[in-house]
Image (cartoon, grey):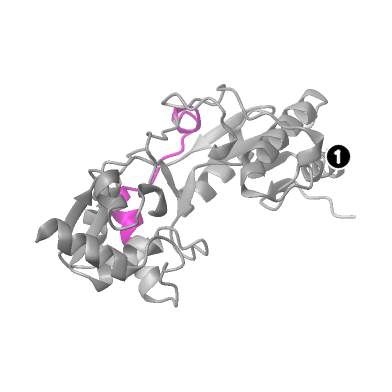
Amino acid sequence: MADPEVVIDCVALHPDDVRTATDIFADADAYVYVSTGGVYADTRIPIREDASLHDWSPDMEDDDAHEAYGPRKAEGDRAVFAAAADGVAAMAVRPMHVYGPHDYTERFDYWVHRVDRFDRGLLPSDGGSLFHRSYVEDVAAGVRIVAESGTPGEAYNVADRTLMTLRESVELLADALDTDVEVVTASERELSAHDLAPSEFPQYTPDPMVVDTQKLAALGWRSTPRADAVAAHAEDYLDSDRDGTTHGPGRQAERRAIEALTG
C-alpha cells in the first residue's frame, strides 16, 4: 500500500471521493483537496473563506450536471473539515477560474484568439466585467504552501492578487502579442439586436466575483504579475492547437454587431 507523506487531490469530484481519500491517507503529513471558488453561496465581495457554502443533498452525489458541481465540491470541503476534526491533516484550496499554459478549458483562449486574429473585438457591457482568475503556477504554489504550512481543517482561496477586467485582459493580451486591437463595447440591449447575450462571452459575469486571498498570502504565497501571467498563457497558446472557438459567439455574429455599432 502507498504511504505518501503528502497527498494533493486534484481528482476528487464527489464528496465520497474525499471521504474515501481522507480515510486511506489519514496518516499523511498533509492531504490537500483542490476545491473551487464555485463552492460559495454567499458571494458578497470580497468572498472570504468563512462565507457560507452551497447546500448539498445525497441525491447530488452522482449528479454530474454543471449546476451540481459547486454543491458537490462544497460538500467535499465539509468532508475535509470533518476529517480534520478526527485528526487528519486535511485542508482545502479554492482556486477561481484557472488560466495559463496547457489550459484545456480554452476559456481564456477565446480572448487570445480574438486578439491574435482580429483588429477589433467585441466586449459585453462596458468591458468592466470582473471575474477573479487564478494563474495556474500560482495555484500550484498555493497548494504546495498549504501542504507545507497550512492548518488542518482550513480552506484557502487562491487567485490573482491584482485583478483584471475583461477589457484589461484584452489590452494585456494585445501587449503580449505585440498587436493593437480596437475594443468595441455593447450593452445587453445592443447585443440582443444581433441575437447575442453578455452571458455568451467567456469569463463574463454581471456581478463582480472577487475572493479574498490574504489568508494564503499570510503563509508567504505571492501571485505572478498579471502581465507576465497573461504573456505566458499567450505564448503557450501560439505553440498549441487550441483556439477557444468552442466558447463564445461566432465571429460572424460579432462582426455584424461591431459593424452596426461603429458604422
Give the left or right position of residue 54, taking residue 186 as reference: right
As drawn, the residue found furthest toward the front would be 193
Q: Which residue is drawn at 39% across and 64% down?
A: 109
Q: Which of 24 and 238 is in front in this view?
A: 238
Q: Residue at x 75, y 45 (%)?
A: 14
Residue 159 occupies quadrant: top left
Q: Which residue is drawn at 46% across and 63% down?
A: 106
Give the left or right position of residue 258, taking residue 40 as reference: left
Percent x, y of residue 56: 72, 32
Q: Which range is magenta? A: 214-231
Q: Which residue was labeled with disc 1?
A: 23
Percent x, y of residue 74: 66, 34
Element marked by disc 1? helix
Q: Which amino acid does label 1 sit on?
A: Asp
In the picture, the quarter occupied by the C terminus is bottom left
Q: How many labels does the image show?
A: 1
Residue 145 occupies quadrant: top right
- Is the residue 69 above or below the residue 171 in the image? above
Q: 10 Å neighbourhood of mark 1: few (<14), some, or many (≥20)?
A: few
Residue 181 visible somewhere in the drawing: no
- Magenta stretch holds residue 16: no
Percent x, y of residue 118: 22, 70
Q: Residue at x 64, y 44 (%)?
A: 69
Percent x, y of residue 53: 62, 27
